[in-house]
Image (spheres, helix red, strand yellow):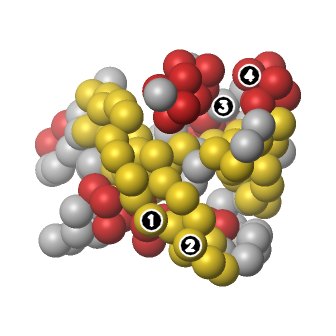
């Protein structure tokens, strides 16, 4: 894993810790989108990540989740419910939602390649921020 890949996998950009401690704690939203026995993920070489990202100014967590999913996957989604909330180690909050696909088509972005991953494979893969993806999938199915 290269340095840039490692930095992104850990969920940080250079300076994030310093900025978030002294200026503002960045908040983010992510989505778990299931399609039968598959989960939508962004493949980033050595690891997978959920569609999601930082909130823009005056944006709700739900709006950020929908916008980020569109930017990263090309899909239009509808957020259904919150399934988890994290307090990030370097400050800020991340909320994870379930969502359904309402339209669009899968398209790659600078973030990586979106694809549906079989759940059994997803459990064995490395996820950004060392996510407990199995727990999130269980919550999404409940």
Q: Pointer 2: residues within 10 angstroms few (<14), some, or many (20+)? A: few
| Quarter where residue 82 is shown | top left
127 or 46, nearer to the observer: 127
| Residue marked by disc 1 | 78
Cα gap from disc 1 to disc 2, whole angstroms: 7 Å
On the image, numbered disc 4 is attached to which residue? 123
What is the C-alpha distance between the residues marked 3 and 1? 23 Å
Query: From mark 3 to mark 4, how far is it between C-alphas?
Result: 9 Å
Q: Which of 125 and 37 lies nearest the eye of the viewer?
A: 37
Q: Position of residue 86 (x, y in %)?
A: 32, 29
| Percent x, y of residue 109 | 70, 70
Label 1 environment density (alpha carbons within 10 Å; few <14, some 14–19, many ≥20): many
Residue under the image location 82 percent in, 24 percent down: 120
First-in-chain label (2 vs 3):
2
Dot 2 or dot 4: first in sequence order is 2
**Residues under numbered marks 2 and 4 in contact, where contact means CB atoms less than 8 Å apart:** no
What residue is shown with label 3?
A: 127
**57 to 122, vertically: above or below:** below
Q: Nearer the viewer, mark 2 or mark 3?
A: 2
Q: Quadrant of the N terminus?
A: top right
Residue 120 is left or right of residue 101, and the answer is right
SS state under label 4: helix
Q: Earlier in the sequence, mark 1 or mark 4?
A: 1
Q: Where 22 sits versus 121, above or below?
A: below
Tell me which numbered mark, 1 or 2, is placed earlier along the sequence: 1
Mark positioned earlier in the residue sequence (3 or 1): 1
Tell me the SS state at disc 2.
strand
Residue indicated by mark 2: 102
Q: Please rate how many residues cluster around mark 4, counting C-alpha atoms within 10 Å: few if below 14, some from 14 to 19, many from 20.
A: some
């Amino acid at each position: 894993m290269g340095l840039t890949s490692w930095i992104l996998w850990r969920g940080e950009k250079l300076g994030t810790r310093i900025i978030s401690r002294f200026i503002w704690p960045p908040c983010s939203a992510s989505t778990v989108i299931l399609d039968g026995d598959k989960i939508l993920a962004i493949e980033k070489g050595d690891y997978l990540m959920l569609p999601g990202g930082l909130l823009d100014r005056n944006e709700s967590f739900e709006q950020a989740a929908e916008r980020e999913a569109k930017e990263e996957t090309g899909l239009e989604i509808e957020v259904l419910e919150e399934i988890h909330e994290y307090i990030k180690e370097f400050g800020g909050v991340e909320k994870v939602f379930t969502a359904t696909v309402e339209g669009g088509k899968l398209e790659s972005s600078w973030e990586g390649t979106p694809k549906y991953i079989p759940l059994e494979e997803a459990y064995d893969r490395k996820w950004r921020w060392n996510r407990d993806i199995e727990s999130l999938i269980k919550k999404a199915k409940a």
